[in-house]
Image: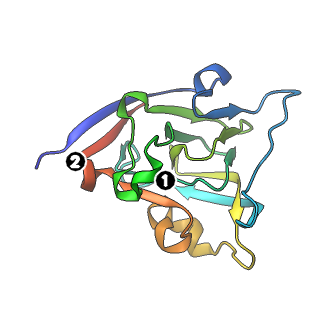
Amino acid sequence: MEQEVVRLKVQPLTAEAFRPYGHMLESKHPLFPEVEPGEGRVAIELLKLKRPTNPRRISMMATHFSYNQTFIPLRGTMALVVAPAPRNRNEGHDRYEIDYAQLAAFFVEPGQAAFIEKGVWHYAVALGHECEFINITRKNPGEGTSRVDEEMGMDKIPSMRPYVEVLDFRQRDHRVIELEL
């Protein structure tokens, strides 16, 4: 079956444009990382995203319901692709909706902070050779980040973090997202 290409223009990160998915950190408006009680702890880590072979084509996104997450590039620019949280969470992972009409992609530049709400679909990709960033996330006691985790990218998350759900929509929906820079 042929894949449908969903074209998505990457736009600058602004508080107003990002509001349906979370918040952009702004002066005098603090953000509060959260992890559901008994579901691990808030963790801050320094990671590097390597530029994938084709940074403009995306076929998967992640979601998690027990915590929110913040991306803060320090060096290099990332594209953060987001979609609203699935409304049909009770139907199970294989049936979660992705509202393709509400997809958005943002340039997140060094020093900016993009805070995504619980359940929001997301995927981050380095637009240059690599993007070094601070990730404010969830970790379980004893869970760390290895060098392999950092270098492999988001496509390896399912085996490393069982509380993160990743959907390959190329396989399920026969669609791919193509970023227009």
Residue that mark 2 sits on: 174
| Left-right relation of 35 to 60 | right
Is 149 on the left-hand or right-hand side of 29?
A: left
Which residue is found at the position 68% from the left and 40% from the top? 115
| Position of residue 18 in the picture relative to residue 25 (left or right) | left
Task: Tell me which residue sits at (53%, 70%) in the image.
Answer: 162
Which residue is labeled 1 in the image? 62
The structure residue drawn at horizontal position 57% and vertical position 28%, both measured from the top left corner, is 20
Furthest residue in direction right, as rendered: 28
Place of residue 153 in the rendered image (x, y in percent of width and height, measured from the top left): 50, 61
Q: Amino acid at mark 2?
A: His
Element under disc 2: loop
Q: Is residue 60 visible?
A: yes
| View extreme (left): residue | 1
List x then y, in percent, for residue 32.
80, 43
Distance between mark 2 and mark 1 Cα atoms? 17 Å
In this view, the residue in front, 39 or 155, is 39
Q: Is residue 61 visible?
A: no
The correct choice, above or below, for 83 with respect to 60 in the image is above
Q: Earlier in the sequence, mark 2 or mark 1?
A: 1
Badge 1 element: strand
Q: Residue furthest bottom?
A: 142
Please state, as top left, top right, bottom left or bottom right, where the C terminus lies in the image.
top left
Amino acid type of the residue tagged 1 in the rendering: Ala
